[in-house]
Image (cartoon, coloured by chain):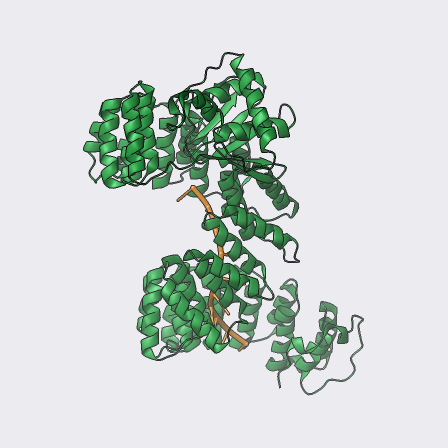
Amino acid sequence: MAISLLSFPAKTLTTTTTPISEFPNNPKTLILEQCKTLNHLKQVHAHLIKSSLVLNPKIAENVLESSAILLPGSMDYALAVFRAIEEPQAAAYNILIRGFTLKQYPEEAVLLFKEMRENDVEPDKFTFACILKVCSRICALKEGEQIHAQIVKFGYGSHGFVQSTLIHLYAKCGKVDVARRVFDELPERGIISWNAMFSGYLKSSHWEEIVILFQEMLESKVGFDEVTLTTVLTACGRLGKLDLGEWIHEYIEAKGLKDNLKLITSLIDMYAKCEKVDTARKLFDKVPRRDVVAWSAMISGYSQSDRCREALNLFHKMQMTKVDPNEVTMVSVLSSCADLGAFETGTWVHSFIKRKRMKLTVTLGTTIMDFYAKCGSIENSLEVFEEMPSKNVLSWNVLIQGLASNGQGRKALEYFSLMREKGIKPSDVTFIGVLSACSHAGLVDEGRDFFVRMSIDYGTEPRIEHYGCMVDILARAGLIEEAYQFIKSMPMEPNAVVWRTLLASCKVHKNIKFGEKSFNHIVKLDPKNSGDYVLMSNIYSSVGKWEDALRARCQMKLQGMKKTPGCSLIEIDGAIHEFFAEDNAHPRSSEIYDAVENMMKRIKSSGYVPNTAEARFDAEEDDKEASVSHHSEKLAIAFGLIRTSPGTTIRISKNLRMCTDCHNATKMISKVFHREIIVRDRNRFHHFKEGSCSCNDYW
DNA sequence: TTAGGGTTAG
């Protein structure tokens, strides 16, 4: 009877070398019992050589198995044992191939298989299963195809294990269609083959196919297992197929499969992705032994549902447990920090990542870059970019976009050139970054040029987002009519976002005519967006058309809409403070209002004049000044001034665009209080320093 | 001696 190593508790193994005098009938038992170290094995091996027992192929294979698989460490000894076997057969080759695979030397395994074929040793079904596994791991498609041919030649084409590894190979190497062909041609399909096909679709993100195939599986009466359900649940999450997900949940409950952590984790993930984060959390709370994946799934559930504060709270809870976070956890945590503009917390997380020596994977590196860029710290973002051992097109996109939104349009374009020099193919998203760089930097001709070249030179057809960027470039530069004509000439129907872009520029350039035209289009496409009414109203006020301005506001109210309240966040000592306009919710509210008053007084004496054109309309004229002085960003800045030491940079993130008055005031605050103030509004960054802003008053 | 499943970025 075979003995598993697991049945020997470590304490029964001796660490000292025990002389071996007699051999039992089954030397493998002995080897397993005694050989904890290579020295043990060497001793046994020496005896086997002396007694010539090693000439028995079965015994030699046992020594081989011990050295290649059971003992950790290098494959040198195993290889020496193997070389001493006179005519090794498939079984010996298989052990060595498994050893190389186990110890992460897949290339050696492939070479050994080649040698085996050159020596005319006939492979068996195990050889094929082992070597195909290696090929899929290193995506060795060419070798895999050759092996496939041999499988057919040797008549193992209908062997279940071989088939499923073949499906895996093709799917892993991106040939999901070939995998499907293999699957379709199977004379008999067991659950394993179905699961292999599911896993192929999973790896290539063919979510829809998983659900369709699952339907077929149910009809085929072959049954399914927990592995099937795990993959199908993942697909349900990606597709938002809550009904099927719930059906599987009921099945899990009914069959008592709740001890399977992988299954429950995919259930948590499914609910979170189907906008049922609270259901996901209830399930999560009931899991007795959560591992790092379960924690990460729940944290990412919050982060992807825009509940970033809860994501950070949960991460905090996780740190109180013994479960260590991994790179994947940190991606969700940092992306939450990025979303909130939580610079301090994110910076701490970055140092935590370094302290724990976590691997700087492309995804993690890109997320760190994005975090810094979204907190207005583009220098740090660049530094991480330079440090990253491997980068992909997403990393470049984050960098270009980050530079663009932080007001460094020209530098963004320099990096685009560098990206080309390095032979990285830009994606459609790259061009959104490039065009927005042109827009933020006022580079109209360059923008036009890129827009034309993106399809001609790079084969990327512009999507509606690219047209939107182009409208922004033209309109920001004051070419309002050209922007309007550009929209009219679009090959697709312009959406509300495109018209809104034009409307926003009409505000900057005080253009009533095209503002009204844009507004009329928007209300047809997206009538329930209060921001558009406010913007239109502000355009009227900016040229003194108060009645029209009031009419736009009334129109909004008549539709039952309320202006989205402005909200600003500031992080102090790792805690995030939230402010709304004229908000009294903060526990230190009266102190903050005093600080605002003091702040406004000081900037007024330095020449700031309040601009009440964008004040609330229901306020009395006298109150308008007070109203604008209580905008959320002013409250947050005042709080920042009293809670941080002199000279510290103040970082604010805001849900709407900054209004003209807040922009003027913040410029002055940066000068009077000698503070760098970075405001992230819904479109871009404003780096205020010594009285001016990086956006050059152009936003 | 052989296979398959859960969490991540623009």
How many discs appear?
0
Q: Is residue A181 left or right of residue A365?
A: left
Q: Quadrant of the C terminus of chain A?
A: top left
Q: Quadrant of the N terminus of chain A?
A: bottom right
Q: Residue at x 51, y 46 (%)?
A: A308
Q: Residue at x 56, y 57 (%)?
A: A295
Residue A110 in the image: x percent, y percent? 49, 63
Q: Is residue A277 left or right of residue A358?
A: left
Indicate the colour of chain A. Answer: green
| Of A423 and A446, the residue lying toward us | A446
| Of A355 and A175, the residue lying toward us | A355
Does A302 appear above or below A136?
above
Residue A26 in the image: x percent, y percent? 67, 85
Q: Would residue A377 be visible to someone looking at this image?
A: no
Q: Is residue A494 left or right of residue A430?
A: left
Q: Residue at x 70, y 77 (%)?
A: A8
| Of A251 and A135, the residue lying toward us | A251
Residue with the most extreme bottom position: A25
Residue A261 in the image: x percent, y percent? 54, 67
Indicate the colour of chain B. Answer: orange
Does A456 appear above or below A480?
below
Residue A648 in the image: x percent, y percent? 61, 26
Please identify the quarter of the rendering in which residue A185 is found: bottom left
Q: Is residue A62 left or right of residue A132?
A: right
Q: Would residue A227 be visible to someone looking at this image?
A: yes
